[in-house]
Image (spheres, helix red, strand yellow):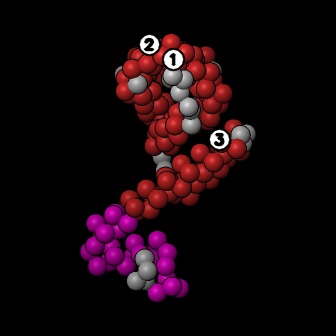
Amino acid sequence: MEFVPPNKRSDEYFRTVFEEKGLADIVKLHMAQASQEAKKELQEQLEEQISEGASIKDIVADIREIANKHCIPDQELIVLIWSTVMAQVEWNKKEELVAEQALKHLKQFTPLFGAFTDTAPRAELALMLKVQEFCYENMNLMRVFQKIILLFYKSELHFTLCLAGGL
C-alpha cells in the first residue's frame, strides 16, 4: 500500500484499481495478508485481556469489533480463541493433575466460547474439532476430551449440529 498515494490508501481504492487492471490475485493476496495481521492483532489483544483479568463481556465486545472490522468468520475466531486460551495455562508437571487443571481453566472461559458458537453451527464444529485435535496432540489430555465436550454442553454450548447426528 505504500506505493499508493497517501490520500488514496484505502482497501476499496486498492481493490478497484487492481481489479480494473486484471490483477485480482494481488487483491486476494493483500486481503489474505490483512486478515492474518488482523488475527495476530486479535490474538495479542486477547492474550493481554486474559492476563489482565478483563471481564468476558469486555473481551467478547472487543473480539466482535475486530472480527467485524476485518470480516473474520466465527469458525476462524473460535479456533483462535481456543488456541489463545489454552496457551495461557502453565500446565502442571504431574500428569494426573493436568486433566483437572484443563477442566477448571476451561470452565471460566465457557461463556467466551459460547458467545461465538451460539448462532454459528460451523463455529461449534470448528471448536469441537480443535478440542479433539488439542487433546490428541497432548497425550495427558486424551482422557479428558469427553469431559470437555460435556462441560461445554452443560454450559449451554449445545453443539446442536454435532450432537444431533449432523456429523
Residue 117 place in picture, x, y as percent: 55, 33
First in sequence: mark 1 vs mark 2: 1
Which mark identifies residue 94?
A: 1
**On-image quarter of the N terminus:** bottom left
First in sequence: mark 2 vs mark 3: 3
Which residue of the protein is positioned furthest toward the front in this rendering?
93
Q: What segment carries the magenta color? A: 5-30
Q: Residue at x 37, y 27 (%)?
A: 137
Between marks 1 and 2 in the image, the one whose residue lies nearer the viewer: 1
Q: Residue at x 63, y 48 (%)?
A: 48
First in sequence: mark 3 vs mark 1: 3
Q: Residue at x 37, y 79 (%)?
A: 17
User: Is there a contact, CB below 8 Å, between mark 2 and mark 3?
Assistant: no
Residue type indicated by callout 1: Lys
Does residue 85 lie above or below 32 as drawn? Answer: above
What is the spatial separation of the Cα atoms under label 2 and label 3, in whole angstroms?
A: 26 Å
Query: Would you say the magenta stretch is mainly helix, strand or loop?
Result: helix
Secondary structure found at label 3? helix
Let me know if residue 78 appears in the view.
no
Residue 167 place in picture, x, y as percent: 36, 22
- Magenta stretch holds residue 18: yes
Between marks 3 and 1 in the image, the one whose residue lies nearer the viewer: 1
Let me know if residue 83 appears in the view.
yes
Residue 108 place in picture, x, y as percent: 66, 27
Residue type indicated by callout 3: Ile
* 155 displayed left or right of 149: right
**What residue sits right under mark 3 in the picture?**
50
Which mark identifies residue 143?
A: 2
Which mark identifies residue 162?
A: none
What is the spatial separation of the Cα atoms under label 3 and label 1, in whole angstroms?
A: 25 Å
Residue type indicated by callout 2: Arg
